[in-house]
Amino acid sequence: MILTPVMLVVLCLIVGLGRAADARGRLVGAVRDAARAASLAPTPAAADQLARTTALADLEGAGLECTHPTITTDTSAWRPGGRLHVTIGCTLDLSALVISGLPGHRTLSADATVPLATYTSYATS
């Protein structure tokens, strides 16, 4: 009888940590997809827009309850043989699991770098 509240708290903690780990995996998948899609764009501006669109669609499709996602695309090495870097930041809502001792919100981030094709001509604007 005394162990019941302790076991309930431990169970909530395990569920909360599992939910955070699952969210991290989905975020990594979204940033990887966004970077790959952006690397196929013809210009840096198009790459930024394509990364943003792809990331938001992936986050929504994955059912990730991400509040205020931030998506940044680094196109400073935009040239044949260069690279593209995308970062996504996401605040995960854990308020339903407050009893577990986890904070109400947790900020996660993930990034991905992909190479640009060596023998492709890229526009710079």
Image (cartoon, rainbow, N blue to C red):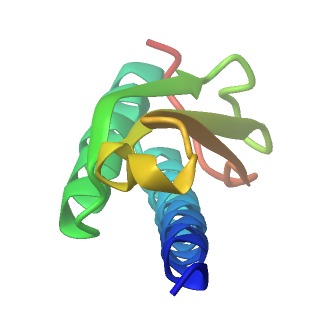
* Above-or-below relation of 66 to 61: above
**Is residue 20 found left or right of 117 in the rendered image?**
left
Q: In this view, which residue lies farthest toward the front?
A: 1
Q: Residue 99, how many percent across, how many down?
A: 44, 52
Q: Residue 52, how many percent across, how many down?
A: 33, 35
Please name whichever residue, 31 or 107, is drawn nearer the observer in this view of the structure: 107
Q: What's the residue at 61%, 49% (across, down)?
A: 120
Q: In this view, which residue lies farthest toward the bottom?
A: 1
* Above-or-below relation of 9 to 7: above
Q: Is residue 55 visible from the viewing direction of this image?
A: yes
Q: Is residue 42 visible from the viewing direction of this image?
A: no
**Is residue 77 found left or right of 33 in the rendered image?**
right
**Is residue 17 found left or right of 60 in the rendered image?**
right
Q: Give residue 81's quadrant in the image.
A: top right
Q: Give residue 74's quadrant in the image.
A: top right
**Is residue 85 found left or right of 59 in the rendered image?**
right
Q: In this view, which residue lies farthest toward the top?
A: 125
Please name whichever residue, 109 or 20, is drawn nearer the observer in this view of the structure: 20
Q: Residue 25, how many percent across, how many down?
A: 57, 68
* Above-or-below relation of 122 to 119: above
- The number of callouts visible is 0
Q: What's the residue at 53%, 26% (across, down)?
A: 73
Q: What's the residue at 56%, 46% (across, down)?
A: 102
* Above-or-below relation of 82 to 58: above
Quadrant showing the C terminus: top left
Q: Residue 116, how many percent across, how many down?
A: 68, 48
